[in-house]
Image (cartoon, rainbow, N blue to C red):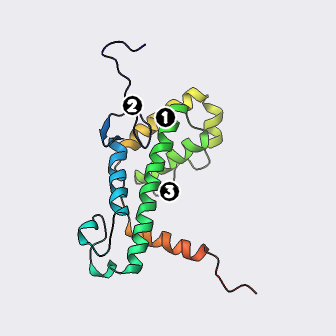
């Protein structure tokens, strides 16, 4: 039974969070910007300049080859961000294992400016030192810090690197003996 004045908060279309208010178009404030960028990237048309919002500036990038690379890889970067937000929200609810907390500590250490990842190999120590409720609370404390750090956004360098990796890992056709 829901009492008058108490309504269940709607969940975000992406991360399913009910702890953050819906910002716009059914998304919470964390998911709205990447979701909007993904929609814009998917609408890109090289022949229509107006659609190329978030596209790298400069004529060197305005070729069909680069267009396909950026459209594919930028969409991949945004989907990765949306997936991370979904998984982090799920861990907020259910808790996290020692290895996930270790990864979170390592990531935060790099983003804080450390020269190397701090707490590499600490998953076993975390699992043995904290029960599940404590690990969930530790994850939440770290995630509250992580949530306040800005998303680095789309990266041209990462897009080109990702494209090159897919080209080198793809099996070559017609070369079998």
Q: CA distance from mark 2 to mark 3?
A: 33 Å
Question: On residue 116, which mark appears?
Answer: 3
Residue 29: quarter of image: top left
38 above or below 176? Answer: above
Q: Quadrant of residue 123?
A: top right
Comes first in the chain, label 2 or label 1: 2
User: Disc 2 on helix, strand or loop?
Assistant: loop
Which x, y percent locates residue 95? 55, 33
Mark 1: give few (<14), some (14-19) or many (20+) Cα within 10 Å: some
Q: Quadrant of the N terminus?
A: top left
Q: Is residue 136 above or below residue 34?
A: above
Q: Going 34% across and 17% down the picture, which residue do you hit?
A: 6
Q: Which mark is residue 11?
A: none
Q: In this orientation, does residue 48 appear?
A: yes
Q: Is residue 154 left or right of residue 165?
A: left
Left or right: where 48 falls relative to 155:
left
Query: At numbered mark 1, what does the secondary structure look like: helix, strand or loop?
Result: helix
Whole-percent x and y of residue 11? Answer: 40, 34
Q: CA distance from mark 2 to mark 1?
A: 10 Å
**How many neighbours does mark 2 have within 10 angstroms: few (below 14), some (14-19), or many (20 or more)?**
few
* Residue under numbered circle 2: 19
Residue at numbered disc 1: 92
């Amino acid at each position: 039974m829901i009492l008058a004045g108490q309504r269940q908060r709607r969940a975000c279309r992406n991360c399913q969070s009910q702890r953050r208010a819906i910002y716009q178009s059914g998304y919470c404030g964390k998911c709205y910007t990447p979701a909007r960028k993904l929609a814009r990237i998917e609408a890109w048309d090289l022949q229509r300049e107006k659609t190329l919002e978030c596209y790298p500036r400069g004529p060197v990038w305005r070729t069909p080859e680069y267009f396909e690379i950026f459209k594919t890889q930028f969409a991949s970067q945004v989907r990765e961000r949306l997936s991370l937000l979904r998984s982090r929200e799920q861990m907020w609810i259910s808790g996290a294992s020692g290895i996930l907390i270790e990864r979170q500590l390592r990531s935060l250490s790099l983003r804080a400016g450390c020269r190397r990842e701090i707490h590499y190999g600490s998953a076993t120590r975390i699992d043995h030192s904290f029960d599940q409720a404590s690990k969930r609370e530790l994850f939440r404390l770290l995630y509250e810090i992580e949530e306040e750090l800005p998303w680095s956004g789309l990266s041209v360098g990462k897009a080109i690197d990702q494209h090159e990796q897919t080209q080198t890992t793809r099996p070559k056709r017609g070369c079998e003996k």
